[in-house]
Amino acid sequence: MNPSSPVAHVSCRDGSPLNGTIRVPGDKSISHRALMFAGLAIGTTRIAGLLEGEDVLRTAAAMRALGADVTREGSGMWRVSGAGIGGLHSPEDVLDMGNSGTAARLLCGILASHDIFAVMTGDASLRRRPMRRVIDPLAACGAVFAARDGGRLPLAVSGAADALPLSYRLPVASAQVKSALLLAGLNARGVTEIEEPEPTRDHSENMLRHFGAAVEVIGQGRGKLIRLRGQPELMASDVMVPGDPSSAAFPIVAALLVPGSSVTIEGVGLNPLRTGLVTTLCEMGADIVILNQRAEGGEPVGDLVVRATTLRGVDVPPERAPAMIDEYPILAVACALAMGQSRLRGLGELRVKESDRLAATLAMLRVNGAQVEVDGDDMIIMGGANRLGGGTVMTHMDHRLGMSALVLGLVADDPVTIDDAAFIDTSFPGFVDLMRGLGAVIGPAGGPVEGLA
């Protein structure tokens, strides 16, 4: 790594607590879906609080290229005039999805059931990620896909002229696959049925109802059966996007770990299928209080008050993974600072994120002195190491890994450096400035950083 690189950052502990009241960016999952469903609706939808990170902006550009009128009207304020279900057209150019696996996989569902041709690509990281889990079941609606070996981007899609409804049982819990199939089912004749073995985030089901679709959800043991009647007339409906709980995870854990801290995070989404991290941290003894609970746009929302706490080790069951799959790197940081051993079970899905996030998290902890090992799909972390920090973390263009490493640096004995901070803005625009506003010491490597000798 070149230490003078403008995108390399370092964080360090200076003994000061974190204090203040903040709002985190809008929920990324809901932002993607709001743009897509609004683009398929009749009429004009206004979206407030939209996450304006690079990932979501790629979705906005893609929906615009497919025929929706998508316009930014102010900070987080967007207007979408939809083309209606079946009203999209072939884009004139390749759809570049950047680093966003969510955008790429969900868009496959829209493309599959429309009589259009499109080619989709992404950055180097996204082109390494598997798409087969989406394109294989979508082919059953009549779409034809052409991709590189392993179903990787670039990907060409010839959508079905008369899409068939789908009936599919998810082999593993995946909100992205489920949502792609539901999006395809919107333009198919008849009823699409999806069985999921474990409950996953249900933002798509909530938003379908919000726009007027007929969705039925039936409990089946631990899982669910979702039924969607195809070819509804979705009607424009304004959306207020809550704060992203996955983004809130970083200031939450930082406030818990930095002694003397007290941070309030306003307007955070509290969908029970997204709050696995809060549940786990509370099991570790975290002082987290939820205030002002309310509903906005069909989603539960509240304000979190987080105070510094001495955490203890935890055993996280594998069935909790879908409710916190993006939060394991920052949870691993919390476990490294906790008292005793933690075991995080069932993390196989992390191997196919922006990076092999399981291996990358392991490397992040080890290079900074933590005792950690992998047993199959489980991560075992021994907290309370004698000395942490001092390492350089290779982020592999993974925004969550970079933010987790910077939080580690705020409580480690020695500074922590990340090789690349550029990708953080894909999911959390302004992360470094927000953390500095709370009192965190984070700065560019090679430049002056307050508190570093």
Image: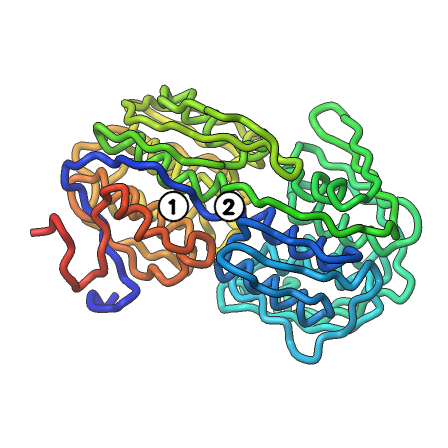
Relative to 450, is 140 on the left or the right? Answer: right
Taking the image as shown, residue 183 lies to the left or right of residue 229, namely: left
Q: Foreground residue, 380 or 398? A: 398
Q: Which residue is mark 2?
A: 350
Q: Residue at x 57, y 50 (%)?
A: 48
Instruction: Tell me the SS state at disc 2.
Output: helix
Disc on res. 288: none
Amino acid carrying label 1: it is: Thr
Q: Position of residue 174 (x, y in %)?
A: 64, 43
| Tag 1 residue | 361
The quadrant in which residue 197 appears is top right
Q: Are marks 1 and 2 in contact (CB under 8 Å)?
A: yes
x and y percentages locating residue 289 in the rendered image: 41, 22
Residue at 29% from the left image edge and 56% from the top image edge:
418
- Nearest to the observer: residue 126 or residue 273: 273
* The one of 138 and 366 positioned closer to us in this rendering: 138
Residue type (three-letter) at the residue carrying disc 2: Leu
Does residue 220 lie above or below 420 as drawn? above
Badge 2 density bin: few <14, some 14–19, many ≥20, Cα 10 Å: many
Residue 440 x/y as whole percent:
24, 44
